[in-house]
Every structure is written in structure tokens, then in C-alpha cells.
Amino acid sequence: MGATMSTFQHIQVPQGEKIAIGADGLPDTPSKPIIGFIEGDGIGPDIWKASKFLFDKAVAHCYGDTRKVAWMEIYAGEKANKVCGNYFPEETLDAIREYNIAIKGPLTTPVGEGFRSLNVSLRQELDLYACVRPVRHFEAVPSPVVNPDAVDMTIFRENTEDVYAGYEVKAGTPEAEKLAAFCAQEFGWELSGHTGLGLKPVSEAGSKRLVRAALRYAIAQKRKSVTLVHKGNIMKYTEGAFRKWGYEVVRDEFSDVAVAWADCNGDPGDKILVQDAIADIFLQQILTRPKNFDVIATTNLNGDYMSDALAAQVGGIGIAPGANINYETGVALFEATHGTAPKYADLDKVNPSSLILSGVMMFEHLGWQEVAEALTGALTKTYGDKRVTYDFHRLMQGATLLKCSEFAEAVAGNL
Ligand code: NAP
């Protein structure tokens, strides 16, 4: 295909080829794929620079000059405001839709006031309904728990609904008064306009496609169980419905390969066991009996809390990767799961592992398995050598403290 002409105002399209998506929703990766990247705010530029350096080294290590990523910078957040005069340019969405695969650093979100989360907007605008977060321990990485190796879970968090849908009104506004009055009149709910109000939409279609994606992942990765995590004892028609619809997917669409606990009394034979857990006890049991859990499917807010709690068990958010995927359109956005840590911006200090491991997920998704394995092996060796950034250094005896860029060089040296 060769060069592609840019139709964007600010985005420069590099020489390379578009990644096409097959009928199965998976990428058909050419030898010089164009992949979008958003550098991110705060520590974003530091971790992106380190990660890109390492990705290019790993691809060259595995394939010489027969394959190479053509990186295409796309803009969101503070850099977008500088370059495009807008925090969330439309052409960013267009570029991701057109080129299908992208990777990003963290983006700032103001708390309480100001613009909506750009991360949430990206996920919703692109309908990236599955937030996929694998959590497992790397040998030698310091952890606050006694047996971090027992954690090997992949969270599928619904990404487009729940209280993240953005249906919120501020206390004391005419909108809050109107909604409170409507609820009082139609439902007899005693609400005042001096209450902040939010809606929690959880749909059958949204729940089912997420559980379907989790089950397909469990089948492909030969995992043993899928746990539906919910707070359905309290929020019966949202969280409880998520559980009900999840079991319907198992019974209606996957009965040849998966079985609900209630249908096998906990003995699934060679099928995947589908069980459910209430969110509060789940948060206790991931600490007390992590081996009981494998693939997790859950609603949006639960998934947010659980991802960080689980990441802490294996070394913290500095090392937790993530991807936002629509398995029908094939559009996938890989991302560091931590935030912008503004106090460390431009200090070349923080751990780039979260973004590097998100890259590992991306290369696996692209079918460049050799690169994913080379990066994973080199990271494991570098942690084992105790050559680490400040976050691990403060928890390790006898470790060598490296800057963000030095850590990437150390990993490259271990490829
Ligand atoms: P944060 O940026 O994730 O930082 C919290 C703490 O986590 C840091 O102070 C640091 O701990 C540790 N940390 C984060 N990234 C690290 C890394 N790469 N290496 C080592 N340690 C790391 O969370 P926040 O302060 O709550 O949020 C800051 C901003 O980021 C907010 O605007 C928030 O909305 C945004 N955010 C964005 C995303 C996203 O883009 N996906 C996700 C979450 C938050 P120590 O201080 O102990 O060293």
C-alpha cells in the first residue's frame, strides 16, 4: 500500500500501512503498520519516550529491518490544547477509527469541576466497551502481600455505561430541581434539587457483550473460570441485572464450553466455570484466596476499584497494563493504567512498566508474539537484576536506582 495521504489538520501520517481488521475483529498486521500514539500529560512524555525506544529496539531485535512500526502522533489533553487549540480534537477520534490501533499515556482529569474525563470520552466515543486488564506478578517485584504469585487474573471491566455514562446534574441547579421534581411526581421519590443526582445505566446489550468478550478470552487463553462481580444485592436492576444477563449469555451461547456454578454444583468438568461474587466480599477474597479467581467480568465502577486493588497486590499501578477494545469494530486503544502523577512530570523518574506492558498486550493483539515475549523476558530479567525505578527501589534491598530512561535502556540491554 505504501504511503497514505494525510487528511488531518495537525496529525502527520507517516510512511507505512494501515492495519486492516478481519471479519473476526482481529487485526491483519502488515510489516510496517501505522500505530497512533498519545503521549499523555504529566509523566506521559517521560514514559512514552522510554517505551517507544524499547518497542523499536524489541521489534528490531526480533525482525531486523523486515518489520517496523510507523508511529503516528495523535493529540489529546494538554499537548492537543497547545497544538490544536482544543483538549479533545475530533481528528484524534477520526485517526483512531481510521487506523484502528493506538496506544496512550495518562491524561489529566479535573476533579469535581471542569471538563469531563478525556479517557472516559475516548472510551465512549469509540465504543471501546471492554477494558481489559491482566494482573499477574513478575518475580522479584516487591509486593505488600505474602504470596503475590497466586494472583493471575484478567479483569474485563465494562467501559461505556454505569455511573461513568456522565448523566449527572449538579446540586442546586435548575437541572437538578427539574430532575428531582420529575422523580417526585412520577416515582414518588423524595429528592431535593439541593442534591447532586446521577444515573447508573446498565443495559442488557452492554452487559452481554462484555461477558461474551470475557468468555471468548477465557476460551482462547484456556482459563478455568469467569467470575461475574457485582453489587446486585443492593442495586438489583443494574448490578443484579448484570449478573442475570451474564448467566444468560453462558446458558444461551456458551453451554458447549462453559457452565454456571448453579448448573454443575461447582464441578464444571472440562468446561469453564462461571460463578459470581458480590463486590465487597470479592475485594476480601482476592487477598485471602486469590487462586479462586481467573477471568473477572464486572461493571464499570467496580472494575475501576478492582483493577487498582489487584495491581497493588502485584507491585502497584506503576506496573499495571490495560487495553480498551471493541471486539466488533476491532478498534483497540492500549494505555498505561495509572494517572499523570504531576509531581513527577519531566523528572525522568517514574516507572514506565505500565505503558511497556500495555505495549506487550498490543504486540500480542497484533500477532507479533515474538516482540511481546522478548519484552516480557527482558523486563523480568531487569526486575530480577534489581535495576529498578524509585517506586520499586524503595521497597527492595540492595537494588540499583535507575531513572525512567535508564530503566528502558537496561531492559533493552536484556532483550
Ligand atoms: P496517579 O497519577 O496515578 O498517581 C498516584 C500515585 O501513584 C503517584 O503519586 C505515585 O505514587 C504512583 N504512580 C503513578 N504512576 C506511577 C508510575 N508510572 N511509576 C511509579 N509510581 C507511579 O493518580 P492521581 O494523582 O490520582 O491522578 C493524577 C491525574 O491523573 C488526575 O488528573 C487523574 O484524573 C488522572 N488519571 C488519569 C488516568 C488515565 O489517563 N488513564 C488514570 C488515573 C488517573 P508515589 O507518590 O507513592 O510515588
Image (cartoon, rainbow, N blue to C red):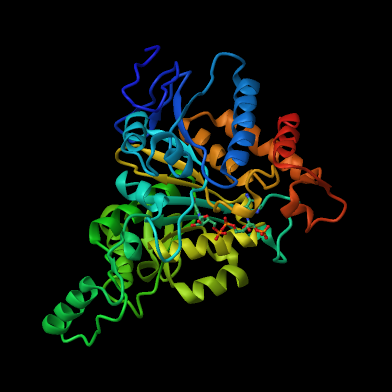
Q: Say if 168 sits above or below 348 in the image.
A: below
Q: Say if 172 sits above or below 365 in the image.
A: below
Q: How many marks?
A: 0
Q: Quadrant of the C terminus?
A: top right
Q: Quadrant of the N terminus?
A: top left
Q: Which of the pair 171/127 is nearer the observer?
A: 171
Side (left or right) of 344 relative to 124: right
**Residue 329, how many percent across, how many down?**
30, 38
**Residue 258, how many percent across, how many down?**
38, 56
Q: Residue furthest left?
A: 186
Q: Residue at x 39, y 61 (%)?
A: 300
Residue 36 at least partly seen: yes
Side (left or right) of 197 relative to 56: left
Residue 214 at least partly seen: no
Q: Residue at x 34, y 42 (%)?
A: 327
Q: Residue at x 33, y 70 (%)?
A: 239
Q: Which of the pair 358/135 is nearer the observer?
A: 358
**Residue 24, how many percent across, how many down?**
32, 35
Q: Which of the pair 79/272 is nearer the observer?
A: 79
Q: Residue at x 35, y 50 (%)?
A: 121
Q: Residue furthest top?
A: 2
Side (left or right) of 398 relative to 315: right
Q: Which of the pair 114/16 is nearer the observer?
A: 114
Asked where in the image residue 406 lies, by quadrant, the reply is: top right
Ligand 1 quarter of the rendering:
bottom right
Asked where in the image residue 348 lies, by quadrant, the reply is: top right
**Residue 408, how many percent across, how many down?**
70, 36
Asked where in the image residue 46 lies, by quadrant, the reply is: top right
